[in-house]
Image (cartoon, helix red, strand yellow):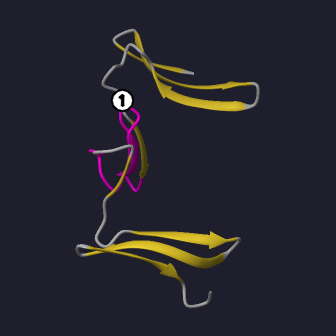
Amino acid sequence: MDFHEDSVIKSYIGSSAGNLTLGTDFNNAAGTIRFQTVNNNRMIIDPSGQVGIGTASPSSILTISSIDPKIQLKNNSTDVGFMQLVNDDIKMGTNANN
């Protein structure tokens, strides 16, 4: 399924060999893929391929922006480890139940 603007393909959703493809077309050099909930951007992929979570302007291949952002590592459904930014400190460790 192609999405047009002024008769030019700007983005598409497709399926081939069991794979789902979602993207912006080469005619849309400034196109960004946005994932939203409740009409708010939650994650974006900018035209250069940089991913932003909590930001619309990623500054590296992966940028996570939040107040005290935390990456939680799970083993099946159990929280076992984490990496967290608190103020200017980076904390890494295991969860209390590990």
Dot 1 corresponds to which residue? 47
Q: Is the N terminus in the top left, top right, bottom left or bottom right quadrant?
A: top right
Residue 85 picture quarter: bottom left
Side of 36 where 1 appears, left or right: right
Side of 96 where 7 appears, left or right: left
- Expressed as whole percent of the image width and height from the top left, the position of residue 36 reads 42, 49
Q: Is the C terminus in the top left, top right, bottom left or bottom right quadrant?
A: bottom right
Residue 45 picture quarter: top left
Magenta residue check for 77: no
Instruction: State the residue at coordinates (42%, 15%).
Output: 26
**Which one is nearer the viewer's eye here, 27 or 79?**
79
Indicate whether 93 appears above or below 71.
Answer: below
- Expressed as whole percent of the image width and height from the top left, the position of residue 78 reads 65, 78
Side of 96 where 55 appears, left or right: left
Q: Is mark 1 on a helix, strand or loop?
A: loop
Magenta residues, as a range? 37-58
Q: Residue furthest right?
A: 17
Q: Residue furthest left?
A: 88
